[in-house]
């Protein structure tokens, strides 16, 4: 499935409707941004428990649970992008371009958005 198709298919699950290309932060957008942070936290929490309770051993059930949470993260990323009028495929391409540029310049490691 293409990211563009995914981004389009999930609109029907957004209780706030087919919002797009917002010019101002509204409750729906804030809801999705906070949801993204929450779902990312769920991923982190599951990994924490794998370390705490299973000595870091990742079981098949853990992979299944993490797959679902990563999907939740993806849903929120795709919806936030739509609200901003951004195509998810373009978001992915811009990220890939940034990483390739950093790799070419030997800047993969380190910190800072503009390196
Ligand atoms: Mg979740």
Image (cartoon, rainbow, N blue to C red):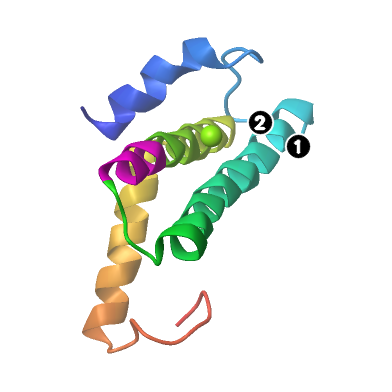
Name the residue at 23% across, 30% down. 2
Q: Position of residue 27 (x, y in %)?
A: 79, 29
Name the residue at 72% across, 26% down. 28
**Where does the N terminus fall, quadrant-wise?**
top left
The one nearer the camera, 17 or 61, is 61
Q: Position of residue 96 (x, y in %)?
A: 29, 60
Q: Which residues are magenta?
A: 60-67
Q: Is residue 70 left or right of residue 34?
A: left
Dot 1, how many residues are within 10 Å of its Cα: few (below 14), some (14-19), or many (20+)?
few
Q: In 3D space, how far apart are the residues under numbered discs 1 and 2 (Cα atoms)?
A: 7 Å
> In the rendered structure, does residue 6 fall within the stretch colored magenta?
no
Is 67 rendered above or below residue 109?
above
Name the residue at 30% across, 33% down. 3
**Where does the C terminus fall, quadrant-wise?**
bottom left
Q: Is residue 29 left or right of residue 66?
A: right
| Mark 1 sits near ligand 1, with its Cβ under 8 Å away | no
Q: Position of residue 105 (x, y in %)?
A: 28, 87
Dot 2, how many residues are within 10 Å of its Cα: few (below 14), some (14-19), or many (20+)?
few
* Magenta stretch: helix, strand or loop mostly: helix
Marker disc for residue 16? none
Name the residue at 29% across, 23% down. 5
Q: Are marks 1 and 2 in contact (CB under 8 Å)?
A: yes
Residue lying furthest right: 27
Marker disc for residue 22? 2
Q: Is residue 72 left or right of residue 21?
A: left
The one nearer the camera, 4 or 71, is 71
User: Which quarter of the figure has residue 94?
Assistant: bottom left
């Amino acid at each position: 499935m293409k990211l563009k198709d995914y981004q389009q298919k999930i609109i029907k699950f957004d209780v706030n409707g087919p919002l797009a290309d917002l010019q101002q932060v509204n409750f729906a957008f804030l809801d999705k941004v906070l949801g993204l942070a929450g779902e990312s936290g769920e991923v982190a929490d599951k990994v924490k428990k794998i370390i705490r309770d299973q000595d870091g051993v990742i079981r098949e059930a853990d992979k299944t649970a993490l797959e679902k949470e990563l999907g939740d993260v993806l849903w929120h990323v795709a919806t936030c992008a739509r609200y901003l009028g951004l195509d998810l495929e373009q978001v992915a391409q811009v990220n890939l371009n940034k990483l390739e540029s950093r790799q070419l310049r030997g800047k993969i490691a380190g910190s800072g958005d503009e390196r």
